[in-house]
């Protein structure tokens, strides 16, 4: 299973337009949320309605739940109730993790966002992927300090620099 948080590439890479995903799923499930009540409505069949097949088609063993299509989606009315989004997203991650042998949650950089916060908290390992340029490495140094503070340590974080440039050593 793979969740892609920013599906704003659809037409540019020749993929068919994906019209449903995490935004619509969250909108549907948050409406059912009640404080302190069981989240029994967060089920695999409910989640699978919003999945799509990856570009290589149905023959693969990969299910895809498209993320937010537009960067501004996270600021819409659907996400105003942070507690509901946190609870529903946490339960979605747990349901999906029980259903699959391997789960990848591809999230953006804002670890204060409810989706990202839950993904990091629930993850066994977090890859921090960084391009090999000086500004990205400096930004990462400061980001790791913030991540350590926000999540009580860096034990689950793994740094992956995406290439090698002799000038950087």
Image (cartoon, rainbow, N blue to C red):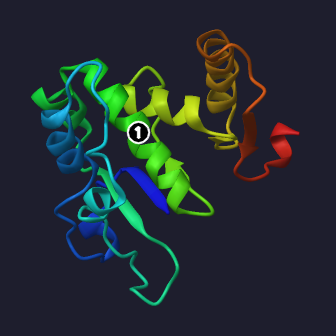
- Quadrant housing residue 151: top right
Can residue 109 be seen here?
A: no
For residue 49, side relative to residue 109 (left or right)? left
| Residue ID at (31%, 70%) | 52
- Crowding near pointer 1: few (<14 within 10 Å), some, many (20+)? some
Question: Where is residue 153 shown, x and y percent of the image?
Answer: 73, 17
Badge 1 marks a residue whose secondary structure is helix
Please, is residue 16 above or below residue 99 in the view?
Answer: below
Question: Where is residue 26 shown, x and y percent of the image?
Answer: 23, 42
| Residue ID at (18%, 21%) | 80
Can residue 98 be seen here?
A: yes
Question: Where is residue 111 shown, x and y percent of the image?
Answer: 48, 25
Tell me the residue that label 1 is attached to: 91
| Residue ID at (49%, 44%) | 94
- The number of numbered badges drawn on the structure is 1
Please, is residue 100 above or below residue 28 in the view?
Answer: below
Q: Nearer the viewer, residue 8 or 112?
A: 112
Query: Can you say which quadrant of the picture contains the C terminus?
Result: top right
| Residue ID at (61%, 39%) | 123
Q: Nearer the viewer, residue 84 or 132?
A: 84
Please, is residue 98 above or below residue 37 in the view?
Answer: below
Q: What is the residue that sits farthest to the right in this orientation?
A: 169
């Amino acid at each position: 299973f793979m969740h892609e948080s920013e599906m704003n590439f659809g037409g540019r890479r020749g993929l068919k337009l994906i019209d449903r995903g995490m935004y619509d799923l969250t909108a549907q499930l948050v409406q059912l949320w009640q404080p302190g009540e069981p989240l029994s409505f967060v089920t695999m069949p409910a989640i699978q309605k919003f999945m799509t097949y990856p570009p290589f088609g149905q023959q693969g063993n990969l299910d895809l739940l498209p993320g937010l299509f537009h960067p501004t989606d996270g600021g819409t009315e659907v996400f105003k109730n942070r507690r509901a989004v946190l609870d529903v997203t946490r339960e979605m991650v747990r349901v999906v993790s029980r259903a699959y042998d391997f789960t990848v949650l591809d999230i953006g950089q804002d670890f204060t966002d409810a989706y990202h916060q839950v993904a990091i908290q629930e993850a066994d390992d977090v890859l921090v992927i960084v391009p090999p340029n000086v500004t990205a490495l400096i930004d990462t140094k400061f980001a790791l300090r913030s991540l350590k503070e926000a999540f009580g340590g860096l034990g689950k974080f793994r740094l992956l620099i995406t290439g090698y440039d002799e000038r950087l050593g």
